Image (cartoon, helix red, strand yellow):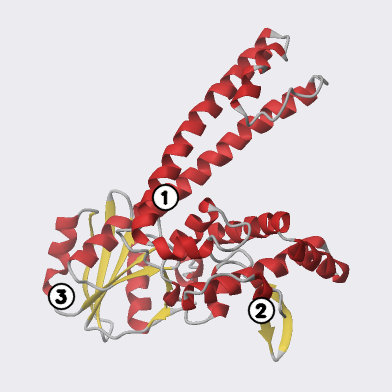
Amino acid sequence: MPFYTKRHKFYCGIDLHTRMMYLCVQEQDGNVLVHKNIKAQATPFLDAVEPFMDDVVVGAECTFSWYWLADLCHDMDIPFVLGHALEMKLIHGAKSKNDRIDAFKIASLLRAGMLPQAYVYPGHLRPTRDLLRRRCHLVQLKSEMLTHIQNTNSQYNLSPLPGDVRRPRVRDELDQHFSDPMVRTSMAANIALIDAYDQQIRLMERTVLAQATRHRPYDLALLRTVPGIGKILALTLIYEIDDISRFPSVKKFASYSRLVKGQDISAGKLKGTKGAKMGNVHLKWAFSEAVVCMMGKSEQARRFIARQAKKGSKGKAMSILSHKLGRTIYYMLKRKEPFTMARFFAS
């Protein structure tokens, strides 16, 4: 976990909310210069920090309302640090907790060089990344509707559905499959939602793909040289990783992608693992999906999984292949080299 260690004259800690923000400004020696509650708007914030603009750093916890503050600091050339919410134990583990105390502690962590950093995603790419995440959410909702149709068919012990319900033609025939009018109404609602989701998902995919073609055309083509990685997985990797150079090593990238667990070591003894759910859940999903798709396209991948499964389990074998694929993609993006199956399975 990286910490912000740069030195400044003034340190501004903000406990940020939707409507209000508690602001605390400290000097290098810890003397508090400003400690007050203000509106969460650009003008009150700039008025509060204006006397310290010559050398001030601003820190805030990673909540759902930090976008505008990060963009404002970027436009005003003010260093902005985003605190990692899960790692700010000094705040969450306190006996007494309120906005005033939290703002003071954030400023104190900044001053001490102990504020755990989260990545401040570039503002010009953030809407595209969020649109892609929204697309994934709609796909999950669509899957719930499809699953409900299958489950309802099983509840009434009816004959198998006339085909794959993901196909519009098959869904049109479901009206004759269920005899009860109440069940038909329920299925009609599912079908209407699925059709609406399909329309919006296709629109989102076209929009994001057009943006990626302008932002990162070479990386998009590079990632699609991997068997099993199509346009959606490639787009997810591009917009969740952003700049591969922000990871100083392949180990840092694997950890951020949830491909490895942390170690709990004390007195030279390994106590176990920790931090399995720390990192980017979207990258974890993308690599897991890529491994499943690779197994469907590559005989070598299936043989690799079979060999590793003999040593443990199939789930463990797929995790090993996910880690291997993550390391490979790190070096592909770093060196701008396409994927080669021979090198991938050489070791």
CA distance for labels 2 and 3:
42 Å
Mark 1: few, some, or many residues within 10 Å (few <14, many ≥20)?
Answer: some
In which quarter of the view is residue 117 placed?
Answer: bottom left
Q: Residues within 10 Å of mark 2 (few under 14, many from 20)?
A: few
Callout in the foreground (2, 3): 2
Q: Left or right? Give the position of 284 relative to 65.
A: right
SS assignment at label 1: helix
Q: Quadrant of residue 184?
A: top right
Position of 85 compared to 308: left or right? left
Residue displayed at 57% across by 20% down: 189
| Numbered-mark total | 3
Q: Amino acid at mark 2?
A: Gln
Q: Amino acid at mark 1?
A: Leu
Residue placed under numbered mark 1 in the picture:
209
Q: Is residue 42 above or below residue 149?
A: below
Q: Secondary structure at mark 2?
A: strand
Nearest to the observer: residue 273 or residue 254? 254
Answer with mark 1 or mark 2, whichever residue precedes in sequence. 1
Residue drawn at x 67%, y 79% as measured from the top left: 264
Residue in the foreground of this view, choosing between 328 and 153: 328
Of the residues under marks 2 and 3, which one precedes in the sequence?
3
Return the residue at label 3.
52
Vertically, is 165 above or below 136? above
- Out of 346 and 93, give the one closest to the viewer: 346
